[in-house]
Amino acid sequence: MSGRIQAPRGTYDVLGEQALAHAALERLARGILERAGYRRIETPTFEATELFARGVGESTDVVQKEMYTLDAGQSESITLRPEGTAPVCRAYIEHGMHKLPQPVKLWYCSSFFRRERPQKGRFRQFWQIGAEAIGSDDPAVDAETILLLAEILEAAGVQSRLRISSLGMPLNRLRYRDKLQQYLRDNAARLSEDVAARIELNPLRAFDSDHPGTRAVMAQAPRLLDELDREDAAHFADVLELLDAADLPYDVDTTLVRGLDYYTRTVCEFTSADLGAQSGVGGGGRYDGLIEQIGGPPTPAMGWAAGVERILLAGSLTHAAAPPLDLFVAYETPELRAAAFRLAADARRAGHAARLELAGRSLKGQLKQADRAGARYVAILGDAGTALKDSETGEQQPVETGTVMHHIAHGGL
Ligand code: HAM
């Protein structure tokens, strides 16, 4: 006897209440994003591995440790998408979207894959709602996208705090990086082994460490935000001014580090105290160099993604129950099955929610099912004719089978 097969570690089935909640959140996000001019995009579940290596960055945890990479034969390597920004940029280039009016605003609600250690709010297959506005470096794009995420979180009942910072453009960052590396080398003895080993590869990640010695060193470390050049500082000041104009509260947090390499200028993260260790409910930023890095023309862009599981965990989204049932078609004897089948199909074609007995129950069992399903009307096809029951009034009357639809469409017997 073989054992029972379960869902892989870190994955889960979306069903029942959770499926309704997922759908409700997607509807809510779609409403908010489409009103702001975003259009849906769905990219493939897997992409060329090189897209993420080049786009997300070789030195990131995501690329180094967390990707599900498959050998697709003929020396082709593909990877289950760990995030959505690089694929959306690939699609922007591939479809010549730079020819459209800019910025091109795209949103998605899709599942992503990262080989992380599963824990509360952290999965190996998880869902994100994401938005990308590509083709403009206007600070209003930054402020607008952030505001849209704030609106979605608020509408989903998530209490969160917005942290925001600016990383500046790459040259400025390189200068800062040298300075930080020098500082880390000078203090290497007090750093965790892990951080010390990555001074050359990714010194910024030192800000992310939980290690007490490292934290003490980082408290005194030079801050990127203090080293921005004039244009980057003005861009950031503009973003903050617009957030103020929209009354969105934020904390400027110079220690904010994002786990992906493509960010330039604005970075942001919404955190929720209701989530425990995995407190990041959504985050993003500007990525003005990414499209060029993966082979497109220089194109500024800004976006974010938020975890669906984390929003549902931290929020209080109420969702409609399963849609109401207008008609349940019951029948007395097997000879009436085809007529019942036809009536249910006709009712659905006419736009009603209609169901038919499908498990060979007795008439009594069928009526119980109709009751359990909350059917407003029950049509009972019998040898002596058809009866229609209005569950709201309890009234039951003989009717012509052909008039059932007329009755339910006009609400009564
Ligand atoms: P990220 O910060 O890696 O950014 O992920 C965004 C959100 O996805 C996180 O805040 C979290 O809510 C959720 N998330 C990430 N990993 C997991 C996981 N293993 N389990 C459950 N939820 C998770 C990005 O992915 C960027 N593409 C965001 C972006 C868009 N930046 C610019 N545009």
Image: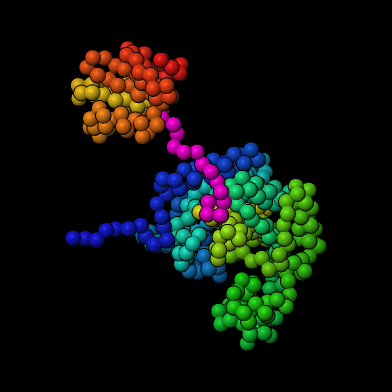
| Residue located farthest toward the front when viewing the structure as drawn | 394
**Which residue occupies 78% across, 65% down?**
229
Percent position (x, y) of residue 133? 64, 48
Left or right: 176 with respect to 157? right
**Which residue occupies 76% across, 60% down?**
232
Question: Is 119 included in the stretch rendered in magenta?
Answer: no
Ligand 1 located in image quadrant: bottom right
Quadrant including the C terminus: top left
**Which residue occupies 46% across, 16% down?**
410
Percent position (x, y) of residue 387? 31, 17
- State how the image is colored: rainbow
Quarter of the figure with residue 360: top left
Q: Is residue 198 visible?
A: yes
Question: Is 321 included in the stretch rendered in magenta?
Answer: yes
Q: Which is nearer the eye, 204 or 172?
A: 204
Left or right: 386 with respect to 70? left
Quarter of the figure with residue 371: top left
Left or right: 30 with respect to 222? left
Q: Is residue 273 above or below residue 150?
A: below
Percent position (x, y) of residue 66? 47, 65
Q: Is residue 375 above or below residue 76?
A: above
User: Dominant secondary structure of the magenta stretch?
Assistant: loop
**Which residue occupies 49% across, 62% down?**
120
The stretch in magenta equals 312-326
Q: Is residue 233 above or below residue 367?
A: below
Quadrant including the N terminus: bottom left
Q: Is residue 97 visible?
A: no
